[in-house]
Image (cartoon, rainbow, N blue to C red):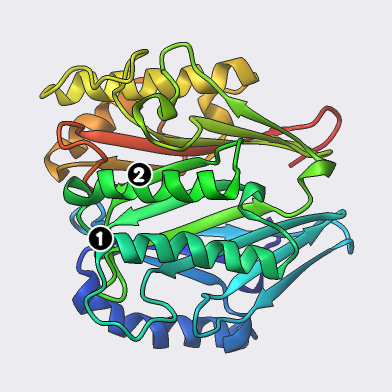
Amino acid sequence: VGAELADVVLERLFFRDLANDYPELPPIRQAAYGAAGVSAEQMPLATYVGQPPCDTGRALELQAYVVVPRTKAGCVTTLPATAELPAAKLVEIDGYRHLYASGFTGLQGSTQAGRSFTDQCDALFRHGAHLLRDLGASFSHVLRTWCYLLDIDRDYDSFNTSRNQFFQSEGIDRLPSSTGIGAQLHPADALCGLDLYALLNPEAATIEVMHASTLNEAPEYGSSFSRGMKLCLPDKTLLFVSGTASVDEAGATVHEGDARRQMQRMLLNVQELLTPQGARFMDVVQTISYLKTAADYELFQELIDDRDLGQMPNSIVVADVCRPELLCEIEMIAVLPAAGSRV
């Protein structure tokens, strides 16, 4: 496709053993990018998560987001990290300003050891708002978030309380699409983490919240996110499908204890989010599948192969989901080209 390492904007790296393997990675990354002419200051963003690949032969799996502008009317600017804020990337293409930021933790800018989960979670969103304000924007410009919790079974209710209060204080009406998932984090004493994507000039695009007939709206059970977000740009439409599980029209978990049927319902829910937008699974360009146990890996592979979904770029990892009884969750990004254009 004509891309180079210099075109990588961000990476998400899934570790089998984050604590032991992370120290070896930074010098390897820097050497690889340095050999490609990328300076340390211009390296892509990176999110390091302890979510072991289900393929037991893999110690590490990587997803990369690459931007190759087709015209000279595009540039990528690195916003360097500060004591309080992680590095970010501002991607400007054809007048649209896309912000990618990853690696927020509740420890940045703090000298306090042992900060509570709520303190760390409040800080995540506060730091995100700080970055956006510095760019003349606000959290209402955020279309997608990824939220990582070290102990999601224990802390998910507190996370929702913190997020709900923050969104209310910010006056956010259009809730971003989101994934809230369990993960080990870096640094090890971080209890939660945040990545985000924002469009800084949303008035120039068409943005719609996505819905599915098989799902209720997450705020009905106290979770402030949208099931999906549709972003229409002149040359393409992006569909951000939130983390989706075996949940029904009333917001209840269905098929408790039955991994096969939970996977089937999860895939049905995603299909019902895509179909009203004119999208199919073949339009999906990025997927992360979360299984509560690697023992269900072969079953999941069987189900997606039966549906001819094996062509989807898909990282399948082990992670706790937002409810203890949920055995799987999936998130996706789909791209639809505008009429007469190519993506």
**Callout 1: SS:** loop
Q: Quadrant of residue 222?
A: top left
Q: Name the residue located 51 percent from the left edge and 27 percent from the top edge.
A: 281
In the figure, is residue 139 to the left or right of 180? right
Q: Is residue 215 above or below residue 90?
A: above
Q: Which mark sits nearer the N-terminus, 2 or 1? A: 1
Q: Is residue 210 above or below residue 250?
A: below
In the image shown, does 109 or 286 lie closer to the viewer?
A: 109
Q: Name the residue located 71 percent from the left edge and 61 percent from the top edge.
A: 2
Q: Residues at badges 2 and 1 in contact (C-beta under 8 Å)?
A: no
For the C terminus, the image quarter is top right
Q: Amino acid at mark 1?
A: Arg
**Residue underneath mark 2:** 160
**Residue underneath mark 1:** 58
Decide if residue 318 is in sight here. Answer: no
Q: Name the residue located 74 percent from the left edge and 54 percent from the top edge.
A: 200
